[in-house]
Every structure is written in C-alpha cells, then in structure tokens.
Amino acid sequence: MWLAVVAGILGLSDSASADWQGTKWGMSPEQADKSFRIPHKPVTDDPPGMRFLKGYFKFQYTTGNIAFDRGGLHFDHGRLNLISMELKDATQCDDLLEALRGIYGDPAADEQNEHARTVIWHDNNNNNKITLQHYAQYAKTCWLNYEPLKPLKPFPPFKLTPAPGGL
C-alpha cells in the first residue's frame, strides 16, 4: 500500500524544487504565493490555543491514498522556514512512516515516550530535516514537518555608524 504513497511524496524533495512543491527555504511570502504549486489561501485567523498552526498560507494535500489536512507554510522574519501537514487519518501514520523510510532510508533519530513517537530524517541533498510526529495515545494526530536542515543564513548584522561629531 505504501508504494502509492511513495510516488506522491517523492515530490516532497525533488531536486528541481529543492524544498517542496515549488517552494524554496528562505523565500518571502510573496514569492511562495507565486511559486507554491498546491491550491492555498492566506491564513486570516488564528484559532485560540492553536498558535503553532499559524502560517502565512494553509492548504490540504493528497498523495495516493494518504490525505493531509491543516497544512501550512510558516515564515519567520518573512522567510519560509517550516512546512507542516497533519494526516487527515492518524491511523495511517505507520503507512506514512514506511513510505518515508522507503524514500529517505533509515532515520537519523527514532524516539518514543509515553506521549509520542518522533522520527527524524536528514536529507542533505535538499537541505531538508523531515520530522514525523505521531501522538497515538492522547491527541491521536500525526504531523509531518519539513524544515531546513542547515539554518538559513542570518540576516546581515546591523552596523551602527557613529553620527558625525559623536563619540
């Protein structure tokens, strides 16, 4: 079953787009709006208690028989730094895990505690850190996150130049 998912998810990090569906890490919201290949809309609301869901754009995505809901492009200081998606049916999280394992190989980390299982892959070729978080016991959710593996280049430092006649 997960082979159909692999075919769709491979677009998550194809070398032509480097990040996902036409996006590039560090792009502005305006650039993402123009290049993002999935139907999306700007986030105009921030549900109470759900600040972590807020992104500049939200979307839904389906690949094979796996559907993602509550997807978001998230920006920090006006630069794309996170793509998050929640599986519509959290019971498919194991199928998604196997699909990701087929794409990225053995994970860099696989940890489980009483609340969640977190599996992380490092895609050095595309500068992606892929994180799958499965909260099976309480919230019964499954999240897939993509973020830059290497941090974005920092903003240039501000240079303080003394005013003429100053200290």
Image (cartoon, rainbow, N blue to C red):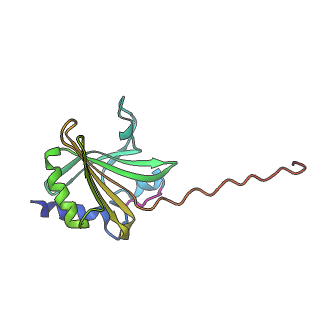
**Image: 68 above or below 2:** above
Using the image, determine if residue 92 lies above or below residue 104: above
Query: Residue 40, how many percent across, how many down?
Result: 33, 48
Quarter of the image containing the N terminus? Answer: bottom left
Total labels drawn: 0
Residue at image position (13%, 60%) is 2
Task: Report if residue 50 lies within the magenta region.
Answer: no
Q: Residue at x 13, y 54 (%)?
A: 65
Which image quarter: residue 103? bottom left
Most foreground residue, 2 or 131: 131
Residues in magenta, as a range = 22-27
Q: Residue furthest left?
A: 1
Where does the image place residue 99, in percent across and percent down from the top left?
Answer: 18, 61
Position of residue 138 relative to residue 16, above or below, is: above
Predominant secondary structure, magenta span: loop
Left/right placement of residue 45 relative to residue 161 reads left
- Residue 156 screen position, x and y as percent: 62, 58
Q: Quadrant of residue 45?
A: top left
Is residue 24 a member of the stretch shown in magenta?
yes
Q: Farthest right residue?
A: 165
Which of the pair 70/34 is nearer the observer? 70
Residue at the extreme front of the image, as rendered: 113
Most foreground residue, 42 or 79: 79
61 vs 42, left or right, is: left
**Apparent side of residue 51 relative to residue 139 in the rendered image (left or right):** right
Residue reaching furthest top? Answer: 48
What residue lies at 38% left-to-right and 33% top-to-bottom? 46
> In the rendered view, does 72 fall on the left or right side of 31?
left
